[in-house]
Amino acid sequence: MLALRLARGAHPLVQLRRLLVAAASAGTGFLLLCTLGYAMGHPDASGGAGLRLAWCVAPIAATVYFAVTVARTDPATQPRSGLSAVGLGPARLTVLAAISTAVACTLGSMVALLFFLHLRGDLTGLPFDGAAAELLAADYPLPLAAALTLLALVPLIASAASAAVLRPRTAKPGDGKGGDKGGGQDDPARPDVPAAPAAPAAPPSGLPWGVALLAAGLAVETYASRAEGTSGLAMPGGLTGSPAGVLTGWTLTALGLAMAGPGLTYLCGRILQAVRPGAMRLLAGRALQEEARRIGRPLGVLCAVGSAAYAALTLYSGDRPAVGPLTTLGALLVAGCAVLTLATAAIEAKHARSDTTAALLQLGAPTAMLRGTAALRAGALAAVFGPLTWAVAELAALPLAG
């Protein structure tokens, strides 16, 4: 009940993000139900039904990632003074965040079920009754237990992931959050001791592992495409005969890009501050270093999605195979969730540095300089991640182009 009241009293932008999570959950749930319909209509093609279900992993992962990002940026789950006194400590807020995520995803799953039943012709009185009866196996009774099990996947996974990400963590000794009371620290009991300047954020540690996974994925793709006698898997959109090793390589490449994203963002900040930087370059570089972990991973995920889309367009440029509506829906879900996740992380980063922006304005910094700093950050990220996306896409499409 408390989670429902917090949801009702939230800002319209927060409500919009929750509705977008519900919409993504509805699209993913509809894809899962369509897989169930294919399995009912083709009882002898268990392999094809299993392959269609496996292709739903990408939309599920994208939806869960977006839901976790929205839960992390939800103001209702942020610790505030006075909440612990009424029993809303960090652990209880984590439970509320998981419940809110589960409610939003469950709402989307119920919409998917109603839309699925409507297109099958089980629900009447609305336009397009039974418009996809043949595709969704309307001649067969719908196994309700199987449908509810598939629809419960996204709410359960998203709520569990939100609880795992937002769980309270205890500060370790010597991590800069306490424990070191040596000289140079700001001591309120000794106003004569000046506060030490804020040290730059520590660089993320995932860049070497991300580069290693990226190289391994490209190597696996190349080896699998040249190996003889490999089994082929039917990819969505009419691309058939793709070796399973190539798809494994694509997965490793996507994971490598997501893991390397924070390190590359931090590196952009270091590059901006190199060689006697001015005020704008210094502010832009320091902001990228501070926000590397927050926006770097969504940038890496968007880079992986963009490289996959570019590689698909390159492969389809010749014969132009027919792309079905379900394939289009899955691609739009993955791409839309990646873009929305990055936008949500960017808004969170803007709110995190609002105090710094206000302090700069009070000191007399012109608004044009702050806009120029934001443009400089965006340009640096585009200059690094744009060519990287193109290069990875070209290398990923090369094994299948032949």
Image (tube, helix red, strand yellow):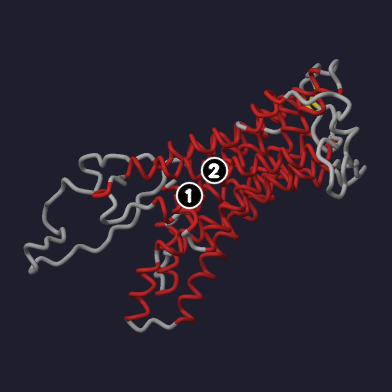
Residue 207 at x, y = what percent?
48, 42
Q: Mark 1 points at which residue?
A: 4
Decide which of 6, 251 is in the foreground and name it.
6
What is the crowding at mark 1: few (fewer than 14 residues within 10 Å), some, or many (at least 20)? Answer: few
Q: What residue type is labelled 2?
A: Val
Element class at badge 1: helix
User: Which residue bears the numbered disc 2?
Assistant: 103
* Picture residue at 91% right of the left edge, 44% below the top: 320
The x, y position of residue 78, in whole percent, is 37, 53
Is the Cβ of the residue at disc 1 closer than 8 Å to that at disc 2? yes
Nearest to the observer: residue 344 or residue 97: 97
Q: What residue type is labelled 1?
A: Leu
Q: Residue 261 location, x and y as percent?
A: 52, 47
Q: Earlier in the sequence, mark 1 or mark 2?
A: 1
Q: Which of 327 and 372 is in front in this view?
A: 327
| Disc 2 secondary structure class | helix
Q: Is residue 375 left or right of residue 138?
A: left
